[in-house]
Amino acid sequence: MATTACGAAVVGARRGRDVSDTPDVPSRLNTGVAHNARVWNYWIGGKDNYEVDQRVGEHVAGMFPIIRAIARADRDFLGRAVRHLAAERGVRQFLDIGTGLPTVDNTHEIAQRIAPDARIVYVDNDPIVLAHARTLLTSTGEGVTAYIDADVHEPEAILERAAHTLDFTKPVAVMMLGILNFVLDHDKARDIVRRVLAEVPSGSYLVLTHPTFDDALGGAGQIPAMKFWNENATPPITARSGTDIAAFFDGLDLLEPGLVSCSQWRAEPDSPGAVPQFGAVAVKP
């Protein structure tokens, strides 16, 4: 088990052991305000949410009905990306920043079905996600999973604590699905990506999804829906143009088919149509 005494806690499980040193969750949990992790869970049919999350989730869905399809498409993209990286690219280490609430086929479950020795570190700072960390901390005997209670705005802290589990001299897939939209300042968001990618070696990957307001993907409806969200829920969120999202991949080589709607990245021919959420996978040269 990996632990740290400074700042946010690192809780881990290898070979299926339970977590025993989780921080005090109830004192941090605010059930009076809708929270993204719980509302997202509601949109994909989960049960780890409260009435306030359901109420806000329904209102947003009324304003922007495709939001449930976006949530499902983002989750499906995760599965395709992890399977591709583990099975076809030989990736054995995953740093999943902005984990969200555990559901069916989490990153470690997908990766370790293909590569039982895969090592996965999850990162989130939502107390309800932390409360469910045990669900994420099940591992094959050969592999390792760990959970870090930390904020995406603190990349150095994430990297320091992830080093308890991951070997940063070997390739790492950095997963940033639907997390940079909570970093409202674009330059700061780009800097976070640069700082994380600077610490992983050549042959590492960036896996990213991000909502867009681009008309080409039907994203204009995101703007009023996000305005309502920012007035009634937490944390605040932003959409970006495809051009701004592409900038997160500067210096990396995009895998085919490049930056596309996440529902269409390496999808089957009968997959759902495009959703206003870009997705891509890129390798560090």
Image: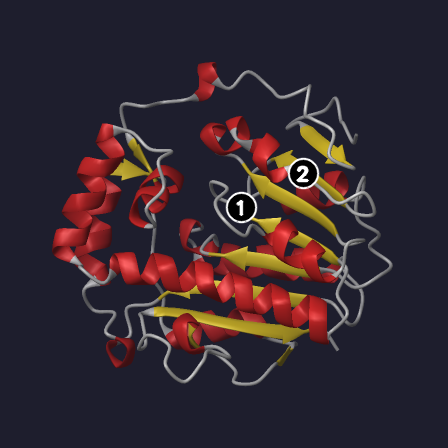
Quadrant housing residue 5: top right
The image position of residue 8, as x and y in percent, is 64, 28
Quadrant for the N terminus in the image:
top right
Q: Residue at x 31, y 71 (%)?
A: 275
For badge 2, the amino acid type reads Thr
The image position of residue 91, as x and y in percent, is 75, 65
Q: Residue at x 13, y 55 (%)?
A: 63
Query: Mark 2 or mark 1, which has the lower sequence index?
Result: 1
Quadrant housing residue 203: bottom right
Residue 154 located left or right of residue 203: left
The image position of residue 32, as x and y in percent, is 27, 23
For badge 1, the amino acid type reads Thr
Residue 138 located left or right of residue 241: right
Quadrant housing residue 7: top right
Q: Nearer the viewer, mark 2 or mark 1?
A: 2
**Image position of 278 with respect to 30: above or below:** below
Q: Residue at x 58, y 32 (%)?
A: 133
Crowd rating for badge 2 (residues with CA inside 10 Å; few <14, some 14–19, many 20+): many
The image position of residue 261, as x and y in percent, is 39, 75
- Colour approach in the figure: secondary structure
